C-alpha cells in the first residue's frame, strides 16, 4: 500500500458507519461557483452541486437512442436502446425474451458476487442484465434520472470501445428534458448527502465517504506486478463536463498474463485489443497509445460512478454529495460499501480497519 493509502487507512480507525439523508437537487443558478475550479460555466450543466441549484425537476431523454456491440463476457452482439421514461420510474432494464420483467438499476438488485462486472437481477430472480456499469455511469453523470433500457441479442450491455465515451455522445445527441409522472406532474430530484464519515475495508482495499459540500472523488490503484500501471491516484471534483472530458474516455483494462485464465472461467470472451487496454507484466502496453497517462485509474473512477448510481431510487440521484475515497476497490467492494451505508447488511467489525 502506498504511504498516502496507509495514512488514510490508519485515519479510518476512528470512523463509524455513516448516516445519509436525502436532499433536494436544485435548479442551476448563474453567477455561482462551479464545482470545477476555473470553469465558472460548469455549474450550468452540473447535476452534482447542491449549493448552486434550487428546485430541480427529474429529467429523462428527449428522444430514443441505441448502440450495438459485443458484450465483454458473453462475446455476443447485443443492442441497448435507451428510451424516455416517466418521472419516478428511475432507470431500469427490460431484457429481450424476459417479457416485460423490469430490472431496476437499484442496489437491491445488484448481485453481491459478479466477477469483473456489475450484474443486476430482478426481484423474482428471472431476468438479469450484465456489465451495466459504463452505461449507468454515463447516465448518472449526465443527469438521466429516468430511462427505460431495452436490451436485445443477449443479457449484456455492449462494451463498445471499453469506455463510456460513446454513451455520453449518444445521450448528448438525444438531449434531455424534464420528465412528467403518470399524472403529468414534475417530481423534485433528490440526492443522498453523507452526514457522517463511513468506510468499509477488506484487506488493504477500502472505500470511504466523508461529508462534503461538493461531490469529490479520490481513487487509488496499485499493480506492482505490472510496472507500466504501477501505483496511480486520480482526484477530481465531479460535474458533467469534467466527466465527459476526463473520465468517460478512459477504457477498461486487463493484465495480458491473466487473459487465458479468465477466458477459461467463461469471462471476457468479447474482450479484444479494440475494446480494452491490455498490459503485459514484462512488456508493458500491447495496444498503445493511452488516452491519459493514468487511464486505468480514471477508468476505476468511471466504474465507481456507475456502481454508486445504484443508490438511486425512483428517479433520484445515486452518487452521494460527499468526498468519496477508494483504494484498490472493485465492483464487489463498491456495492458492499453501499449496502453498509444503506443499512441493508451488517458488516462484521473484523473486516473494518
Image (cartoon, rainbow, N blue to C red):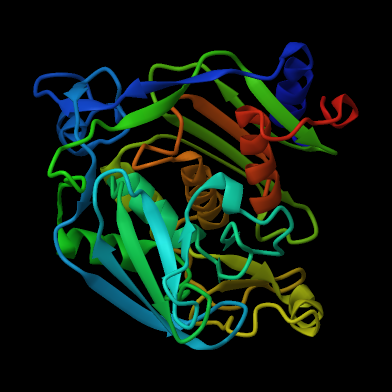
Quadrant placement of the C terminus: top right
- Residue 259 location (% of width, % of height): 74, 78
- Residue 159 location (% of width, % of height): 48, 74
Q: Which residue lies most toward the front here?
A: 183
- Residue 115 location (% of width, % of height): 71, 64
Residue at 70% over, 50% down:
332
Residue at 57% over, 83% down:
272
Residue 142 located left or right of residue 348: left
The reply to whether residue 205 is visible in this rendering is yes
Q: How many marks?
A: 0
Residue at 64% over, 45% down:
335
Residue at 39% over, 60% down:
249
Which one is in front, 273 or 78?
78
Residue 343 located left or right of residue 157: right
Which one is in front, 12 or 118?
118
Which one is in front, 185 or 233?
185
Which one is in front, 335 or 22?
22
**Residue 28 higher or lower than 257, as above or below:** above
- Residue 296 location (% of width, % of height): 57, 56
Amino acid at each position: 500500500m502506498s504511504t498516502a493509502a496507509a495514512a488514510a487507512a490508519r485515519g479510518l480507525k476512528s470512523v463509524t458507519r455513516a448516516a445519509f439523508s436525502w436532499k433536494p437537487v436544485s435548479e442551476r443558478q448563474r453567477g455561482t461557483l462551479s464545482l470545477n475550479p476555473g470553469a465558472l460555466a460548469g455549474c450550468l450543466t452540473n447535476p452534482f452541486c447542491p449549493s448552486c441549484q434550487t428546485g430541480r425537476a427529474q429529467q429523462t431523454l428527449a428522444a430514443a437512442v441505441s448502440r450495438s456491440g459485443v458484450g465483454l463476457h458473453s462475446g455476443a452482439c447485443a443492442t441497448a436502446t435507451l428510451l424516455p421514461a416517466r418521472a419516478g420510474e428511475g432507470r431500469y432494464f427490460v431484457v429481450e425474451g424476459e417479457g416485460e420483467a423490469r430490472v431496476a438499476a437499484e442496489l437491491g438488485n445488484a448481485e453481491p458476487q459478479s466477477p469483473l462486472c456489475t450484474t443486476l437481477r430482478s426481484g423474482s430472480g428471472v431476468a438479469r442484465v450484465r456489465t451495466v456499469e459504463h452505461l449507468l455511469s454515463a447516465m448518472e453523470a449526465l443527469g438521466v434520472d429516468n430511462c427505460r433500457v431495452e436490451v436485445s441479442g443477449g443479457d449484456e450491455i455492449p462494451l463498445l470501445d471499453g469506455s463510456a465515451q460513446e454513451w455520453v455522445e449518444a445521450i448528448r445527441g438525444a438531449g434531455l428534458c424534464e420528465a412528467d409522472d403518470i399524472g403529468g406532474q414534475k417530481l423534485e430530484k433528490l440526492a443522498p448527502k453523507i452526514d457522517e464519515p463511513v468506510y468499509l475495508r477488506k484487506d488493504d482495499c477500502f472505500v470511504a465517504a466523508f461529508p462534503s459540500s461538493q461531490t469529490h472523488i479520490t481513487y487509488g490503484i496499485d499493480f506492482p506486478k505490472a510496472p507500466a500501471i504501477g501505483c496511480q491516484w486520480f482526484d477530481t471534483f465531479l460535474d458533467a463536463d469534467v466527466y465527459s472530458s476526463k473520465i468517460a474516455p478512459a477504457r477498461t483494462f486487463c493484465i495480458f498474463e491473466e487473459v487465458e485464465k479468465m477466458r477459461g472461467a467463461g469471462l471476457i470472451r468479447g474482450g479484444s485489443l479494440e475494446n480494452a487496454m491490455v498490459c503485459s507484466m514484462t512488456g508493458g502496453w500491447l495496444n498503445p497509445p493511452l488516452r491519459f497517462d493514468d487511464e486505468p485509474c480514471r477508468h476505476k473512477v468511471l466504474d465507481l460512478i456507475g456502481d454508486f448510481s445504484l443508490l438511486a431510487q425512483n428517479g433520484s440521484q445515486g452518487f452521494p454529495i460527499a468526498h468519496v475515497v477508494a483504494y484498490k476497490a472493485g465492483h464487489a467492494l463498491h456495492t458492499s460499501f453501499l449496502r453498509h451505508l444503506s443499512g441493508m447488511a451488517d458488516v462484521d467489525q473484523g473486516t473494518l480497519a
